[in-house]
Image (cartoon, rainbow, N blue to C red):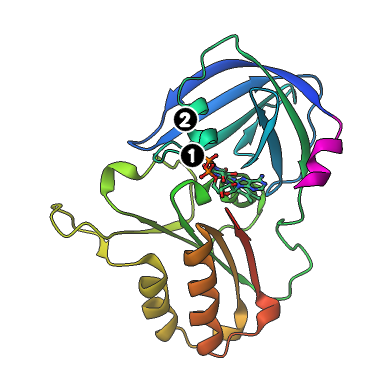
């Protein structure tokens, strides 16, 4: 954390703030030339000082606008401030940085992405970047259906699961990692799948343990924990 004080700070201006689900806010920032590898994140300096990490959700074609999505449920200092962000606000950030990126050299043919909440953020640009999308499954978990953002990526299979028992719902129910394991049990060639996991730390570590218990090689499990 101490190191974060020494990253080169860059400036950006908020040009759009948009609610994309009941708990996710998408924020677009205008900055100078912004190049990144899908999966990377930025450090946002809240009120210039408090460092919080946010994965990059989207970058404009001319590479001068980048977007993040933030889960605004919660009372932490970051989320409390971000909820109040308005257009034209100027902020400092550092990055992009991070090594949670899609492994182009992987020998497996199938890619399974598992996310809860804002954990979807790094997966959207990663998946858009994969040329052959036919063997991609995106597993998305939330408490309720209104927490899911709209996802427009053709050619991928998306499995949604909610944990709220009181909601009328035709999709899967229960924790998304358990749902994913049920799908895995029906797979003949488990060794042909790479797994990418992102979201709350306990979900990420539970999913990793479940996969290892199914004899999935650690080298095929890539993950990013949104916390410590
Ligand atoms: C690589 C990465 C990418 C992330 N991407 C996203 C994203 O795309 N969308 C999203 O909604 N959230 C993301 N997060 C989580 C985000 O950084 C914040 O932790 C979250 O918004 C809660 O912050 P808060 O200040 O509201 O809560 P708090 O309760 O204040 O923070 C949560 C806890 O984590 C600690 N903490 C949080 N950030 C840091 C930090 N940078 N250094 C040291 N300690 C810290 C706090 O001290 C506190 O104990 C990401 C986290 C990581 C590590």
**Disc 1 from disc 2: Cα separation:** 6 Å
**Residue 94 within the segment the image draws in magenta:** no
Q: Residue at x 80, y 19 (%)?
A: 32
Q: Residue at x 27, y 48 (%)?
A: 145
Q: Which residue is mark 1?
A: 76
* Ligand 1 location (quadrant): top right
Would you say the residues marked 1 and 2 are in contact, meaning their CB atoms lie under 8 Å apart?
yes
Number of other residues with Cα within 10 Å of mark 1, as a class: few under 14, some 14 to 19, many 20 or more: few
Tag on residue 80? 2
Element class at badge 2:
helix
Above or below residue 107? Residue 63 is above
| Image quarter hosting the C terminus | bottom right
Q: Quadrant of residue 215?
A: bottom right
Above or below residue 199? Residue 223 is below
In the image, the residue with mark 2 has its CB under 8 Å from the nearest atom of ligand 1: yes
Does any portion of residue 30 appear in the rendered image?
Answer: yes
Does any portion of residue 136 appear in the rendered image?
Answer: no
**Residue 7 within the segment the image draws in magenta:** yes
Q: Quadrant of residue 95?
A: top right
Q: Taking 80 as reference, is 121 left or right?
A: right
* Percent coordinates x, y for residue 127 in the rendering: 60, 52
Q: Taking 1 as reference, is 112 left or right?
A: left
| Majority secondary structure in the magenta region | helix
Q: Which residues are magenta?
A: 1-8
* Percent coordinates x, y for residue 13 in the rendering: 66, 15
């Amino acid at each position: 954390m101490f190191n974060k004080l020494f990253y080169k700070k860059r400036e950006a201006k908020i040009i759009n703030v948009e609610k994309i689900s009941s708990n996710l806010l998408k924020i677009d920032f205008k900055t100078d030339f912004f190049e990144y590898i899908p999966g990377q994140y930025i450090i946002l300096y809240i009120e210039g000082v408090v460092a919080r990490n946010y994965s990059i959700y989207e970058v404009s074609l001319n590479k001068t606008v980048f977007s993040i999505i933030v889960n605004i449920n919660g009372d932490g200092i970051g989320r409390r401030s971000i909820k109040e962000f308005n257009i034209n606000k100027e902020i400092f950030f550092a990055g992009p940085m991070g090594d949670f990126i899609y492994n182009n050299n992987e020998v497996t043919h199938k890619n399974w992405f598992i996310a809860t909440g804002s954990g979807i953020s790094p997966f959207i640009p990663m998946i858009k970047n994969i040329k052959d999308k036919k063997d991609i499954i995106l597993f998305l978990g939330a408490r309720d259906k209104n927490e899911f953002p709209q996802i427009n990526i053709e050619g991928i299979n998306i499995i949604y699961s909610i944990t709220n028992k009181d909601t009328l719902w035709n999709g899967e129910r229960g924790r998304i990692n358990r749902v994913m394991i049920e799908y895995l049990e029906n797979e003949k060639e488990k060794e042909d799948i790479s797994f990418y996991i992102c979201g709350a730390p306990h979900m990420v570590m539970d999913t990793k343990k479940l996969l290892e218990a199914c004899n999935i090689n650690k080298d095929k499990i890539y993950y990013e924990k949104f916390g410590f």
